[in-house]
Amino acid sequence: MSEPTVFIIDDDSSARKGLTRLVSAAGMNVESFPSAMDFLDSGNTEGPGCIVLDVKMPQMTGPELQEELAKLEYCMPIIFLSGHGDIRTTAQTMKKGAVDFLTKPVDKEALLNAIQESLAKDSENRVQLEEKFSIKERINKLTLREREVMTYVITGMLNKQIAAELSISEETVKIHRGHLMHKLGIVSVAKLVHLCEKVGISPAKTRAY
């Protein structure tokens, strides 16, 4: 993985240059953009790194860019900067995952601390994302029937109950269950439930027994 970069997005050229110098002097990689659209066009939208983002910009505001980035597979941590900050905007951006909301002129130490926090968060998030991709890759190797059996197993049902639910033999359930556990590299139902939760797979709906 490449070294993380601090992406500064601000339409004020003076502020942008000052922030760039500050971050660079702190020994971090930095790239700057005069608009949200320029950043979107750069191909750097998924990092690694973090974003220092001005709130008030023409064409696309900081919060609007935050919404666009949230649609992607992964969104880097965002630090908002504003000379026009208000409680409502602050609350909305923080609720949507922003790391911090600082007012201009920004306190240098506060900004550098926020950047360090954001880079650490990005690193942690990427470990979790890599794990999620790995789980999905293993689950995609399951047959349709194995995946179906899996959704019943994580409900805590016994093999004979799953067999009745799917109208197949108990022995067939055991075979599929063994295959799916082997492919996923796990030996316990608790671990299977944990993996499914990580990738948002819900238990199958079953009849009451």
Image: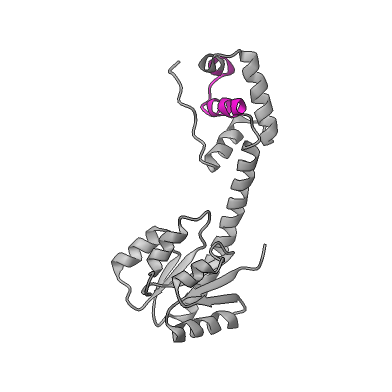
190 or 45: nearer the eye?
A: 45
- Residue positioned 67% across, 20% down in the render: 175
Task: Return the x and y of residue 190 as percentages of the image width and height.
Answer: 58, 33
For the N terminus, which image quadrant? bottom right
Task: Return the x and y of residue 196 as percentages of the image width and height.
Answer: 55, 37
Left or right position of 208 against 149: left
Q: Is residue 161 above or below residue 202?
A: above
Instruction: Answer whether residue 203 is visible to the viewer in this image.
Output: yes
Q: What's drawn in magenta, residue-wise?
A: 144-162
Left or right position of 65 against 162: left
Task: Return the x and y of residue 122 as percentages of the image width and height.
Answer: 56, 61
Q: Is residue 139 above or below residue 63?
A: above
Q: How is the protein colored in the picture?
A: one colour
- Residue positioned 65% across, 29% down in the render: 180
Q: Locate residue 86: give its quadrant.
A: bottom left
* Residue 117 inside the magenta-drawn segment: no
Instruction: Answer whether residue 117 is visible to the viewer in this image.
Output: no
107 or 30: nearer the eye?
A: 30
Badge count: 0
Q: Locate residue 148: give its quadrant.
A: top right
Task: Return the x and y of residue 201 as percentages of the image width and height.
Answer: 52, 36
- Residue positioned 45% across, 25% down in the render: 205
Q: Is residue 106 above or below residue 94?
A: below
95 or 140: nearer the eye?
A: 140
For the C terminus, which image quadrant? top left
* Residue 155 inside the magenta-drawn segment: yes
Q: Main secondary structure of the magenta part?
A: helix
Q: Is residue 110 above or below residue 181?
A: below
